[in-house]
Image (cartoon, rainbow, N blue to C red):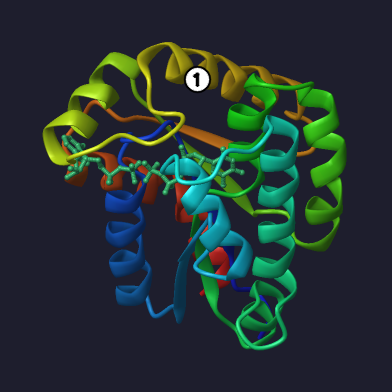
Amino acid sequence: MNNNLFIALEGIDGSGKSTQARLLTEKLQQAGHKVHSTFEPTNGMVGATLRNILRGNIKADERVIAGLFLADRLDHLLNEETGLIKKMQDGYTIITDRYYFSSYAYNGTHMDINWVIEANSICAQILRPDVNIFIDLAPETSMQRISANRAGTELYETLDNLRNVRNKYLESFEKLKHEERILTVDGNNTPEAIADNIWSQLSGHIKAAS
Ligand code: ADP
Ligand code: TYD
């Protein structure tokens, strides 16, 4: 049976993606899905380099960073043992905390967004999400959540940058609305209310896959 789903969670830093990935995993498992929950940047070799860049330990040009995110994504897809293509073939429903819209929004803020979209089209050809879920939250609120819960901030975690990133998310959704399925949810509710909203909007897809 090959009707498992590939779901990407998107949003600015601190918008609640990891929280919703956990809640959605639980709901899908209760509905009988075999779920693989994953994230980008990955824990692989390129992902480790990216985390060093994000923490400020290594400096790199924004174009190099965009290229590294693409390389990390290709390894995320194609790795022979852990890759998402293999997981899909093995019947897993996959939830990924970030996928290529993160590149459009974040890397497209610092360089030509069309280049980023074009470069990542290889990933869209390999595995396009059944749905991209965008958790929309005001950058002011997400910055408050980040500073309340973490000791330090990463490269892109400034109010100005997150405002630009949110705008680039909206711009890329508009650009790709004919190719991509995008579901937007309000990130201002309680985690449970957001999870219920996602679940009710996904129900058509879930039924099709069960
Ligand atoms: P992300 O993965 O997008 O960075 P997280 O899920 O880690 O976001 O959430 C960031 C912080 O905000 C965490 O401390 C989390 O507990 C908190 N949080 C998540 N969802 C909500 C919510 N709906 N309302 C209030 N706080 C939340
Ligand atoms: P992540 O660890 O998901 O951060 P958070 O949990 O705070 O949302 O992502 C790390 C950072 O990497 C985040 O600021 C977004 C950025 N990023 C890109 O710039 N391009 C990409 O393609 C991806 C996947 C992430």
Q: Secondary structure at mark 1?
A: helix
Q: Judge left or right: residue 134 versus residue 151.
A: right
Q: Residue 42: horizontal and vertical position, in percent?
A: 53, 63
Where is ligand 1, by quadrant? top left
Q: Judge left or right: residue 20 versus residue 37.
A: left
Residue at position x 71%, y 76% in the image: 85
Residue at position x 35%, y 18% in the image: 139
Residue at position x 63%, y 88% in the image: 90
Q: Residue 20: horizontal and vertical position, in percent?
A: 32, 50
Q: Residue 48: horizontal and vertical position, in percent?
A: 52, 62
Question: Of residues 186 and 137, which is closer to you in this image?
Answer: 137
Type of residue at label 1? Arg
Residue 181 seen anywhere in this rendered image of the structure: no
Residue that carries the numbered disc 1 in the rendered image: 166
Q: Please, is residue 93 above or below residue 1 in the view?
A: above
Q: Please, is residue 175 above or below residue 57 in the view?
A: above
Q: Please, is residue 126 above or below residue 82 in the view?
A: above
